[in-house]
Image: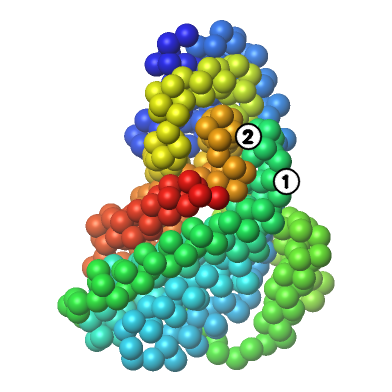
C-alpha cells in the first residue's frame, strides 16, 4: 500500500482540510472516518456501526462536560462570578503590566477553582476598556493574558478543565497500548505550562509593552452595572458548592461526580430553584454540549482508524521517511497536531484523533512514556491558541472588542498563535529528546 493512499493518512488530511474550510467539526470527523474506512475496504454501514460503537470510549468525558457546563451555568446565574469580576476590575491598580498579569491570574481561576470558563469576560472586560485606553495598554497584550489563563491551567493543573484534558490524554494513550495515569500527565505537563508562561512574559514586557492609542468610545456596560456588590445567601451557598466540587474531585478523581455534587448542593441550598433546574441543564448543554458530542464522535473516529488496520503500515512508512530521527519525528508530531487543532478549535477533541497514530509511532521511535505524554499534550494543545474557532481566542475578543476596536484575527489570533504555539512546539520538541 502506498503511503499516500494509506487510509489513516488520507483520513487525517481530509479531516484537516474540511475543518480548515470551516465545515462543522462533527461532519468533518464523520466524513473523514468514512473516507478512511472506504479506502480500507470497510463498507459504509459497517463503518458507521464501528463509529457509533466507539462512542463509549469518551462517554465519561462527555458526561463530565455536561455536568460541568451545568454547574458553570448555575454559578453564572447566581452572579457570584460577576461580583468577583466587578470588584477585581476596581482594585487592579494603575500599572499596566501588573494589571495584565492579574487578568491572566483571574482567567486561570476560571478554569480550575471557579470553573465558569469564558463567562466572566463579557462582565469584567468591557468596563475596563476606558482604563485600558487611559493607560494606553495594547489590547493584544490583554488578549495574550486572557488566553494564557484560559489555556495554561488545563495543560498543567489536574483540576477542573485540567482534569478533563489530562484524563483524555491518559485514557487514549492507555487505550492505544501505553498505560498512563492522570498523575503521570501532570508530572510532565508543567514543562508546557512554563513554555506558555515565557510566552506571556514576552508578550507583556517585550512585544506589546509600547503604548497604543485607542479612541474613547462609549461601551455597553449594562451587564456589569446590573450586578450588585452585596453577597447574599445564594452566593454563600455557591461558594460552598465550589469548595465541595474541589473536595469531591480530590477524593474521587471524578470531575463528572464532583460537578454533579456541586449542582446538587446549589439545588438543596436554594441557590438555584428546583423549577429552574431544567433551564440550567439546558444551559449546560448549550455551553458544553457541542464539545461533548465532538468527544463522542472523536472516540468513534479513533475506533474506525484502528479497524482499518492501516496504523502500523503508516507508522512503519513514517519511520522510514523520518530516517529514524527522533528530532524530525517530534517536529512532525507537533506540526500535525497544530494543523488538526487549528481546524477543530479544541485541544480536547484532538487527542482521540491523534492518539491512535502517535502512540504507536512514539513507541517505534523509542520515545519514553514521559516524552510521549509531552508530545501528545503539546500536539493537542497547539493551535488552540490562535484558532479562530477556539474559546481561547473567541473569549478574549468578546470582551476586548466591546467598543469595536479589537480585531479578532490580527489582535487576538495572531498574537496568541505567535506567543504560545511557538514556545509549546519548541519546548516539547527539545525536552522530549531527553526525558
Q: Position of residue 404 (x, y in %)?
A: 26, 67
The residue where tag 2 is placed is: 299
Mark 1 residue crowding within 10 angstroms, few (<14) / some (14–19) / many (20+): some
- The image's mark for residue 317 is none
Q: Are marks 1 and 2 in contact (CB under 8 Å)?
A: no
Q: Position of residue 376 (x, y in %)?
A: 53, 44
**Which residue does the image show at 47% across and 65% down from the upper left?**
194
Label 1 sits on a secondary structure element that is helix
Mark 2 residue crowding within 10 angstroms, few (<14) / some (14–19) / many (20+): many
How many numbered marks, from 0 up? Answer: 2
Q: Is residue 79 visible?
A: yes
- The image's mark for residue 60 is 1
Label 2 sits on a secondary structure element that is helix
- Please name whichever residue, 30 or 333, is drawn nearer the observer in this view of the structure: 333
Q: Position of residue 205 (x, y in %)?
A: 29, 76
**Which residue does the image show at 63% across and 34% down from the upper left?**
299
Among the 4 quarters of the image, the one containing residue 199: bottom left
* Chosen colour scheme: rainbow
Counting residues from the start of the chain, the first of labels 1 and 2 encountered is: 1
Q: Position of residue 293 (x, y in %)?
A: 60, 41
Among the 4 quarters of the image, the one containing residue 69: bottom right
**Which residue does the image show at 67% across and 37% down from the upper left?**
178
**Which residue does the image show at 38% across and 57% down from the upper left?**
423
> Between marks 1 and 2, how big is the CA–CA gap?
11 Å
Among the 4 quarters of the image, the one containing residue 156: bottom right
- Please name whichever residue, 398 or 187, is drawn nearer the observer in this view of the structure: 187
Q: Is residue 408 visible?
A: no
Amino acid at each position: 500500500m502506498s503511503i499516500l493512499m494509506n487510509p489513516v493518512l488520507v483520513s487525517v488530511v481530509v479531516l484537516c482540510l474540511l475543518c480548515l474550510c470551516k465545515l462543522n467539526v462533527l461532519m468533518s470527523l464523520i466524513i473523514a472516518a468514512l473516507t478512511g474506512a472506504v479506502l480500507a475496504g470497510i463498507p459504509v454501514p459497517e463503518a458507521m456501526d464501528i463509529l457509533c460503537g466507539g462512542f463509549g470510549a469518551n462517554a465519561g468525558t462527555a458526561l463530565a462536560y455536561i455536568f460541568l457546563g451545568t454547574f458553570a451555568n448555575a454559578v453564572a446565574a447566581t452572579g457570584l462570578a460577576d461580583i468577583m469580576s466587578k470588584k477585581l476590575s476596581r482594585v487592579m491598580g494603575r500599572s499596566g503590566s501588573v494589571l495584565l498579569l492579574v487578568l491572566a491570574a483571574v482567567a486561570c481561576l476560571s478554569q480550575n477553582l471557579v470553573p465558569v470558563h469564558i463567562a466572566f469576560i463579557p462582565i469584567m472586560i468591557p468596563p475596563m476598556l476606558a482604563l485600558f485606553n487611559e493607560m494606553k495598554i495594547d489590547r493584544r497584550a490583554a488578549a495574550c493574558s486572557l488566553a494564557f489563563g484560559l489555556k495554561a491551567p488545563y495543560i498543567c493543573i489536574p483540576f477542573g478543565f485540567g482534569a478533563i484534558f489530562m484524563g483524555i490524554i491518559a485514557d487514549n494513550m492507555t487505550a492505544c497500548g501505553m498505560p498512563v495515569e492522570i498523575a503521570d500527565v501532570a508530572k510532565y505537563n508543567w514543562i508546557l505550562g512554563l513554555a506558555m508562561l515565557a510566552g506571556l512574559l514576552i508578550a507583556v514586557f517585550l512585544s506589546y509593552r509600547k503604548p497604543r492609542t485607542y479612541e474613547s468610545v462609549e461601551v455597553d456596560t449594562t451587564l456589569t452595572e446590573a450586578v450588585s456588590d452585596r453577597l447574599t445567601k445564594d452566593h454563600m451557598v455557591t461558594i460552598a458548592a465550589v469548595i465541595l466540587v474541589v473536595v469531591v474531585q480530590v477524593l474521587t478523581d471524578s470531575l463528572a461526580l464532583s460537578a454533579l455534587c456541586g449542582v446538587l448542593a446549589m439545588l438543596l441550598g436554594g441557590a438555584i430553584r428546583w423549577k429552574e433546574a431544567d433551564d440550567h441543564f439546558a444551559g449546560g448543554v448549550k455551553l458544553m454540549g457541542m464539545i461533548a458530542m465532538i468527544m463522542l464522535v472523536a472516540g468513534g473516529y479513533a475506533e474506525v482508524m484502528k479497524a482499518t488496520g492501516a496504523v502500523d503500515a503508516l507508522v512503519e512508512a513514517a519511520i522510514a521517511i523520518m530516517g529514524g530521527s527522533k528530532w524530525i519525528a517530534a517536529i512532525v508530531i507537533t506540526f500535525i497536531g497544530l494543523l488538526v487543532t487549528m481546524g477543530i478549535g479544541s485541544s480536547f477533541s484532538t487527542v482521540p484523533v491523534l492518539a491512535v497514530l502517535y502512540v504507536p509511532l512514539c513507541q517505534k521511535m523509542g520515545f519514553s512514556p514521559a516524552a510521549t505524554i509531552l508530545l501528545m499534550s503539546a500536539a493537542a494543545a497547539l493551535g488552540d491558541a490562535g484558532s479562530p474557532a477556539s474559546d481561547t481566542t473567541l473569549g478574549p475578543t468578546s470582551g476586548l472588542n466591546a467598543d469595536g476596536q479589537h480585531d479578532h484575527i490580527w489582535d487576538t489570533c495572531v498574537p496568541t498563535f505567535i506567543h504560545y504555539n511557538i514556545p509549546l512546539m519548541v519546548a516539547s520538541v527539545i525536552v522530549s529528546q531527553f526525558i
